[in-house]
Amino acid sequence: MNASGKTIVVMPAYNAETTLEKTLADMPRGSADEVILVDDCSKDRTVELARRLGLTVIEHKKNLGYGANQKTCYREAMKRDAEIVIMIHPDYQYDSSLVPIMVELLRRGHCNVLLGNRIRSRPEALSGGMPLYKYLANRALTFVENVWLGQNLGEFHSGLRGYHRKVLETIPWENNSDDFVFDSQFLVQAVHFGFQLGDIPVPVRYMKEASSINFKRSVTYGLRTLETLLAFTLHRTGVSKSPLFLDQKAET
């Protein structure tokens, strides 16, 4: 068990030049021991800005995908002996002022995985700019995931997440997709390995500058999420083993 008590914030970034500084400005001083930004070959000045702001910057030489970006984030955090890892998108969609609250809840052991929940009410979600089709898809998928996995989360599809180190040491996230479904796979894995999941309310912020996948990729993401749920059931029943649910320690 890691005893450093270190908190590291990781930011998987792609073209976040216009929103990065605002995201950081809302984070209270002293919230983290280090902020790591992993840039997935942005076409703007994200890297230059991040360095000027004093962040630790890791650059991908080519665009590897959102899931691959997170893998680099977690590898770097683990190398630095993080006890608590907070992942936040640097697109200002999520309120970074909540980082110290999330850290405290994770450190106290109230849960092992903590998500930002944007869906407190339909009017708030829609008035915050969430497209109607995304709201409906979010509600439908979250309902299915809660029932299938025996959870009670407000939403499964958040870009603000916190993990205790033992989660990252246990889950075989290196076997996950390099695309957006990485997030869904990670949460299903967390359930499989018996970790406690919880959430914390966050405001809804959809804006022109914020990153967002298009309708076609959203459909692909939804279908692959359902595929992950099916793989979970087949693995648990012994019908078909999946590398997503193999114990890291057993593999090594």
Image (spheres, rainbow, N blue to C red):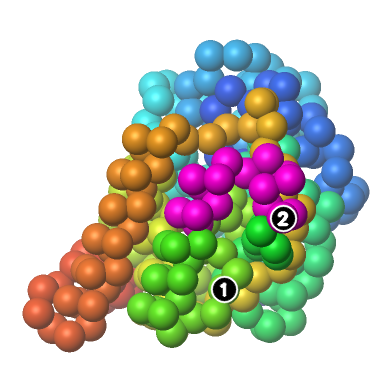
Q: Residue at x 46, y 71 (%)?
A: 143
Q: Position of residue 88 (x, y in %)?
A: 65, 48
Does the stretch in magenta take in 133? yes
**Residue extending farthest left:** 239
- Label 1 sits on a secondary structure element that is loop
Does the stretch in magenta take in 124? yes
Crowd class of label 1 (few under 14; some 14 to 19; many from 20; radius 10 Å): some
Quadrant containing the N terminus is bottom right
Q: Please determine whether, in this image, residue 120 is positioned above or below residue 183.
A: below
Front disc: 2 or 1 = 2
In the image, which disc is placed on residue 168?
Answer: none
Q: Residue at x 41, y 36 (%)?
A: 215
Q: Is residue 64 shown to the viewer in this render?
A: yes
Q: Position of residue 123 (x, y in %)?
A: 72, 55
Task: Give the mark nearer the N terminus: 2 vs 1.
Answer: 2
Magenta-colored segment: predominant secondary structure: helix
Q: Residue at x 77, y 38 (%)?
A: 23
- Which image quarter: residue 234? bottom left
Q: Position of residue 205 (x, y in %)?
A: 72, 43
Q: Is residue 185 left or right of residue 25?
A: left
Q: Which residues are magenta?
A: 123-138
- Which image quarter: residue 48? top right
* Circle 1 residue: 153
**Count of marks, rendered view:** 2
Crowd class of label 2 (few under 14; some 14 to 19; many from 20; radius 10 Å): few
Q: Residue at x 73, y 45 (%)?
A: 128
Q: Please determine whether, in this image, residue 82 is positioned above or below residue 220.
A: below
* Circle 2 residue: 123
Q: Position of residue 203 (x, y in %)?
A: 76, 53
* Amino acid found under the numbered disc labelled 1: Leu
